[in-house]
Amino acid sequence: KKIIIIIIIFLVFAWLYGWLSNRNKYFGNDVEDIKNTIMVKTGIKSNITVFDITDMDYYRIAGFINGDYDNDKMGYVVFKKEYPDNYIFEYIHVTDQSGDGIEVDFLNLGENNYSIVIANNTEFAQIKRVIAGVGTDIVKISHNPSLTLMQEPIHRNTSIAYYFYDEDGNEVE
C-alpha cells in the first residue's frame, strides 16, 4: 500500500510540474496560437492579421500586422520546434514602421543567419540584395504585406546593401 501511495504522489507531482511548465509557454502551432502569443507579448489587443508563416528546420516564423493602414504595427514572431507540430515562442520583433513601411532585420536561427524584410507597401514588388564580392540576389514579392527571408553569407564582415523596387523597376523608399 505504501508503494501505491508513493506512486500516486509521484504521478500527481509529475502532472503538476508538467502543467505549471506549459502554463508559461506560448505556442505557435496554428494561426490562433500565433495571434494569442502576439497579443500577450506586445499588448496589442485586437485586429491582428498573421501572414507568411514559414517553417525552416526547427523554427516557425510568422509576419503580422495590426491596426489601420496609417497607424499599423507590423513585425514577426519566431517559434522553436519542441517536437513535431509543437512550436514554442522564442522571439518577437515589432517594427517602428507604419503606413508604407519596409524594414530589414537580421535573425540568427541556430547555425544560420538570415535577413528578414518585412513590408506593408502596396508598391513594393522586388528586393535586390547586393553582397560585396559575392553577387546579387533578386526576390520578387507577390503580395502585401509580406515577410521575406534570405540566408546571409557565412562571412560576418560582408557588406550587404538592399534596394526595393515597384513592378516597373522604380526604387521604393
Image: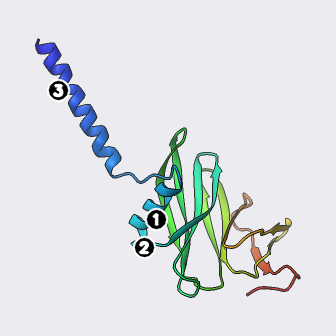
**Residue 21 shown left or right of residue 122 in the figure:** left
Question: At 64% from the left edge and 46% from the top edge, which residue is drawn?
Answer: 57
Q: Residue at x 32, y 45 (%)?
A: 21
Looking at the image, residue 135 sits to the left or right of residue 78; the answer is: right
Q: Amino acid at mark 1?
A: Ile
Which of the two labelled residues, at mark 2 and mark 1, occupies the earlier sequence position?
Answer: 1
Q: Residue furthest toward the top? A: 1
**Quarter holding the C terminus?**
bottom right
Query: Which quadrant would residue 153 be assigned to in this image?
Result: bottom right
Labelled disc at residue 38: 1
Check disc 2 and report the residue beneath it. Answer: 44
Give the amino acid type for the residue marked by disc 2 in the picture. Ile
- Judged by depth in the image, the label closer to the viewer, 1 or 3, is 1
Amino acid of disc 3 = Ile
State which quadrant residue 36 falls in.
Answer: bottom left
Residue located 27% across and 39% down the image? 17
If you read the primary sequence from the N terminus, does the residue marked by circle 3 or circle 2 appear first?
Answer: 3
**Residue 37 against residue 122 in the figure, above or below:** above
User: Do the CB atoms of the residues marked 2 and 1 lie less than 8 Å apart?
Assistant: yes
Res. 161 mark? none
Dot in front, 3 or 2: 2
Q: Could you say whether the residue bearing mark 3 is in a helix, strand or loop? A: helix
Where does residue 132 sit, x and y in percent of width and height? Answer: 82, 71
**Is 22 or 39 nearer to us in this picture?**
39
Q: Residue 159: x and y, percent?
A: 75, 73
Q: Is residue 26 above or below residue 11?
A: below
Decide which of tag 1 and tag 3 comes sooner along the chain.
3
Crowdedness near tag 1: few (<14), some (14–19) or many (≥20) residues, C-alpha within 10 Å: many
Q: Quadrant of the N terminus?
A: top left
Residue 9's disc number: 3
Tell me which residue sits at (68%, 64%) in the image: 156
How much space separates mark 2 and mark 1, taking CA atoms? 7 Å
